[in-house]
Amino acid sequence: MGKMKRYCYGFCLLISIAINILLSINLYVGENNQQTTHRSLLTWSEKAAAEAEEVAAISCSGHGRAYVDGLVFDGQPVCECYDCYGGRDCSELSPGCAADAESGDPVFLEPFWMQHAADSAVVISGWHRMSYRYPDYTTMSEELENYIRKLHSLVGNAITEGRYLVFGIGSSQLLNAAVYALSSENSSSPSNVLASIPFYPMYKEQTMFFNSESFQFEGDTNSWQSNNWTNNMDVIEFVTSPNNPDGELKKSVLGGKTIYDHAYFWPHFTPITGPSDHDLMIFTLSKLTGHAGTRFGWAIIKDKDVYEKVANYISVADLGISKDTQLRVLKLLKVSVEGDGKPLFEFSYNKMRDRWDRLTAVFSKSTRFSIQQRHPLHCNFFNETRLPSPAYAWVKCEREEEDDCGAVLEAGKIIGRSGSIFSAKDRYTRLSLIKSQDDFELLLQRLTELVALENGSIETM
Amino acid sequence: MGKMKRYCYGFCLLISIAINILLSINLYVGENNQQTTHRSLLTWSEKAAAEAEEVAAISCSGHGRAYVDGLVFDGQPVCECYDCYGGRDCSELSPGCAADAESGDPVFLEPFWMQHAADSAVVISGWHRMSYRYPDYTTMSEELENYIRKLHSLVGNAITEGRYLVFGIGSSQLLNAAVYALSSENSSSPSNVLASIPFYPMYKEQTMFFNSESFQFEGDTNSWQSNNWTNNMDVIEFVTSPNNPDGELKKSVLGGKTIYDHAYFWPHFTPITGPSDHDLMIFTLSKLTGHAGTRFGWAIIKDKDVYEKVANYISVADLGISKDTQLRVLKLLKVSVEGDGKPLFEFSYNKMRDRWDRLTAVFSKSTRFSIQQRHPLHCNFFNETRLPSPAYAWVKCEREEEDDCGAVLEAGKIIGRSGSIFSAKDRYTRLSLIKSQDDFELLLQRLTELVALENGSIETM
């Protein structure tokens, strides 16, 4: 018994020590793991972070998304399904659904931001920048301005050295701010605002809506030039390059005061042949990073007087751009300039090239429909010669009787934006190529079906 | 020896088991603690959260603040010091510094948001709402709209049932949107825009700046009434209630079309005697939660046609309000409605009452300077009769020769906003009471010094 007892004591002690060692290792490793997963002990930001991750983890079958500010059902945010998908988890495809290629929603870049989740997330504290102004008494973040200049310098698409910058609520607000800044102060003869057909409808809409005594919309540059033009007339010309809807690189027609709308002047849409250096250039986050929902744009301006007028417009209209928006844009641009911009622009260019390759393959089988010609150019950013891959296909219905191309496409379950919206003929329709992958796949499917009908000569109208 | 050995085994085993127990408790409690501090294992949001907390922890001596989007020195964001403070940690008070009571920066609420840090923080993912639109095809968050209606219902300051809501870039943008919406469509006789002196200068500035053929600024309602007024004239009247600068509750003078600017119609500034129920009312986040840097306001509109025109203005001007701004505002309003609004409005009211108590004590000793009279009213929200505590003191210089009150105050190292900016006489000056505690303390000190000079009859000019 004594010996047994002694063995037992010895054995139990060994086991007990072994357990001690295991527990100690567990504690040590556990603490170490903790340090890897949680670099720092979070306090006040933890709740918001957990909430954001919880919502982001809700599965919507890849055909929808749940958001922290989404509608709530049973205390939980619900999936918001993409077009043509439905059901609680967005898994149900609606069979006869039309392909909606109408809007310029740049959701094609969403996967890039999901891949860069950690670097692009931003935490905004409840007390973040409550004042109207930054410490330098402006309403513009100096850090953000620095990153915008850095990005242009990396991409090589605009000269910013010695130029003024003004932020706006998207490029939208800056378009009208620029018209005000360039318009004649002598209101007895208002400035004439023009653009070249086909053009982005906002130019006309804004200019007419604000109904100012200082300017008036006069329509197309080319017909104006042949009819009314004299050298001393006061004109403000919108030059959209690459152009919306057709992707063409454009130059001023009238040679007067110009507003260069460079929304699409990024390597994913066009080869960058050199930096733009015009008097007044406008860019937007929407078509750069894909964040259309974040209303943010900027103007690059040479002349101090024009700069002050544009800045004054922004101030009078709404006292500047939200500080939370500026903080988020800063985060997004920090990611955009990583690796000298290569990760972002390679992702975006490859996506657009792939879409164009597949699109041209479909249209090459058609004589009923055509799309715009594309010509290779040398891209300084990628340092090679490439075809442009515009944001939109500018489709023409070639059959003489089919002069309402939008209606022809709609009969084939494809929704585009009709030519007349761009002051062109309805024989043309714009199809958006920058929406989600689901949207693009459905568009391609419907186009393929439509082109397949041609030889069978089944009329779709 | 055998017995000794046995004792040793037994003793060691006991100790070992005790250690086991302790280690196990440690592990268990440790895990529990972990669960308290880290409710969930964070992945992609961790980096941004850690960054935000690190910057928030930078000490700026309570006289400044560091921000994640602030300027960076040696890889670290630096303190941005409040007025009159300097040095690396903002600990150095500049001795002869003037008290700046010029702007309406509502930083007095900053401490409330620091106290509610966990609930008011928001994490925005890189892919948050990239589209132009919400799933209901609008540019307005339905959840946010619900919370705005809920807040008005809690506070009892506006009827929202059966009314339309439109969001704007601050109330600033909505002021002009409202003028457009209410103005005559017959541009041969533009609508006449008026306000009652003293009035917020933005009304005049915007109306003149946009230089529309549809409306023109005609100045003061009272002089207009006695000179030009006939019943069939087309007028749009701004009614600011409580009024900026003097805090008065105002009513329409002309009885035509009105825009009620209710920026200050919250329990911290005025007793809420009942819900406002006018055709077009404008509110702003800035003077409700103190977030002036977040450009966000809303209009409550009765008539569908007017609503559609205001909504169209926002759309044409800049395609709506940033989704990130809307997400942040939603978070702030969720905190605002907690405890039926009591925590927020008790904090804000107590702060304002305290400032008014101390301010009136100073002015009561003066015959040279006076401030506006305040009259008690029953506040439905707090369910008691209270004095208003306006955002601004409207100071009058009583000595006949001191007709430039701003200059008199400036000589006493106090910066206000002169009466003429509000189309009133320069015998009046507006002093802001809603800035930071530092600013208010310095203002009170300078006022006390100035009033102390009166009996010594030392001229300060």
Image (cartoon, coloured by chain):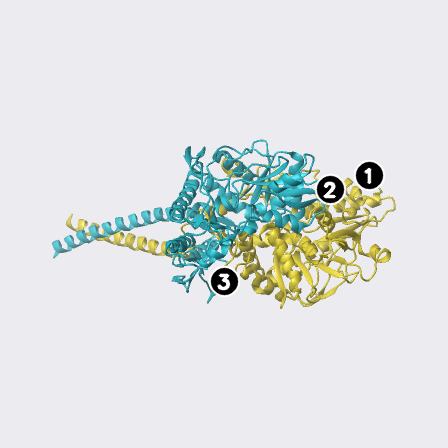
Chain colours: A yellow, B cyan
Q: Gap between marks 3 and 2, in whole Å?
A: 51 Å
Q: Is residue B129 visible?
A: no
Tell me the tag on residue B189. 2
Give the spatial CA distance, label 1 vs label 3. Answer: 61 Å
Host chain of mark 2: B
- Residue B396 visible in the snapshot: yes
Q: Residues within 10 Å of mark 1 (few under 14, many from 20)?
A: few
**SS category of the residue bearing label 3:** loop
* Three-letter amino acid code of the residue under disc 1: Met
The residue at which mark 1 appears reads as: A461
Disc 2 on helix, strand or loop?
loop
Considering depth in this image, is A362 or B335 the residue closer to the camera?
B335
SS label for mark 1: loop
- The x, y position of residue B332, in whole percent, is 49, 44
* Left or right: residue B150 compared with residue A91: left
Q: Chain of mark 1?
A: A
Residue sticking out furthest to the right: A400
Instruction: Please determine whether, in this image, residue B187 is positioned above or below residue A108.
Output: above
Identify the residue under disc 3: B71
- Residue shown at 21% from the left, 53% from the top: A10
Depicted A256 relative to depicted A366: above or below: below
Between A330 and B262, the one nearer to me in the picture: B262
Query: Which amino acid, by three-letter code, is at mark 3?
Result: Leu
Identify the residue at the far front of this view. Answer: B400
Q: Position of residue A274 (x, y in %)?
A: 69, 67
* Mark toward the viewer: 1 or 3: 3
* Residue B23 image position (x, y, % from top left): 28, 51
Left or right of A39 in this view: B227: right
Residue drawn at the location 61% of the way across and 41% of the way down: B221
Closer to the chain start, of discs 3 and 2, is: 3
